Structure formats: C-alpha cells, structure tokens
Image (spheres, helix red, strand yellow):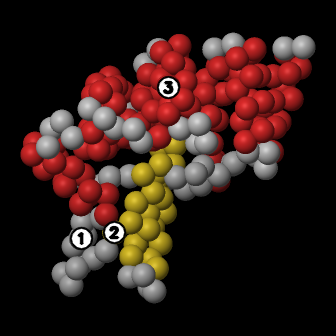
Amino acid sequence: MGHSMAPANAPSELSKVPSRITVYNKELDRYFQVVREGSDIYQTEYQLDEQGSKLFTAAEYYYDLLEQLRTSMPNDPTVLACLGRKAIAEKQNSEAVEYLKRALQNGSNFEATYIDLGEALAHLGQVEESAKVLEQGVAAWPFSADIQKALVLRYVTLKQFPKADEALKRYVALFPEDTFMRGIQAKVEARNP
C-alpha cells in the first residue's frame, strides 16, 4: 500500500506552498510530509528503520487492519463506517454511500457516519438526500456542532433559506461562540427578511 495521506488545513495563499515539503522532528523521531495537489493539501508522517526504509505510517497500519476487518467482520457498523470514510478520502463516493448506508442500517449511530454520508451524497450531486441524512443526524445528535453546521451549510447550498435560518437560529442558540456561523446567519437573514 502506498502513502495514505490525510487532508490538512489549507493556508490562505496556496500559491506560496511548494508542491512537497518534508520536515524531520528529532524529538518525535518522525518525518512529516505535506503535499500540495492543486488546491488540496495532504499530510502524512513516517519513520525510518535502521536501513533507511520507511516504516508503516499510522494511516497505512490502520488501512491494512481495516482491510482485515472488512473480511472478518463485514457487517460490523464501525468497520462499515470506517470503510465509508476511507472511500471518501479516496474520492470513491458511490462506494462510500454504500458502506455508510449499511453502517447506519446495522446500528452505527456515530455522528461522523451521518456527516460522512451527507458529504458523500453531496459529492454525488444528491444534495437534497444529503440534507435529509443530516436532518436524521441532528435528530440523533442534537448537541453536535459538526452535524448542525453541516446541515445549515447544506440548506444554504440548496438555497432553502427559511430552513437555513431556522437551523442557524438553533445552532447559534446552542453554540453562540461560533462567530463564523453568526456571520452566516446575518447573510441568511438578509436574504430571508
């Protein structure tokens, strides 16, 4: 298996970021690598053995273990949810939707499962279905800032401003410290007098 790269937070000026940077942290005895591909930035970490060969990264070990679990526990909701997340990372959204729907059907009630399924559906152009999944997630996890925020943004994408306004009011009441979402609320209210 090649390098498994995890998305990183992108800086505001991507043009200044080289396409590949590797830094060694002596204290942790790890190499950290950041790769820019267009507007996406990914990061990974690895160590070297005595011969200078790369050891498994945490992500590579995780993906190898996940493949074993896919075979030995094919209906486990946690395994299915993890396979769905891996498929999203690999931009295999149809496969992700299948895994994540099965995860929910088999009892996965993780907030990340709802968010991941909503994301995969949206990438496939099924934005309305994505909103329905996120609505189910809010019902199951009413105090999850991540699901609530994803639902608000999905309503805005769908231009369902009355729903977005209602969801934003609920979100801001629960999480008043989120200045970004309060700014979104002001924009939605301006469109929905």
Residue under pointer 1: 55
Residue under pointer 2: 46
Q: Are marks 2 and 1 in contact (CB under 8 Å)?
A: yes
The label shown at residue 5 is none
Residue 127 image offset from top left, x and y in percent: 52, 16
Query: Is residue 146 among the parts visible in the rendering?
Result: no
Q: Check disc 1 and report its element: helix, strand or loop.
A: loop
Residue 140 image offset from top left, x and y in percent: 50, 33
Residue 128 image offset from top left, x and y in percent: 53, 13
Distance between mark 2 and mark 1 Cα atoms: 6 Å
Q: Is residue 148 left or right of residue 80?
A: right
- Residue at figure coordinates x 66%, y 27% from the top left: 152
Q: Check disc 3 and report its element: helix, strand or loop.
A: helix
Residue under pointer 3: 136
N-term-proximal mark, 2 vs 1: 2
Distance between mark 2 and mark 3 Cα atoms: 38 Å
Query: Is residue 121 among the parts visible in the rendering?
Result: yes
Quarter containing the C terminus: top right
- Residue at figure coordinates x 22%, y 79% from the top left: 49
Q: Amino acid at mark 2?
A: Tyr
Residue 8 against residue 173 in the figure, above or below:
below
Residue 127 against residue 73 in the figure, above or below:
above
Crowd class of label 1 (few under 14; some 14 to 19; many from 20; radius 10 Å): few
Q: Amino acid at mark 1?
A: Leu
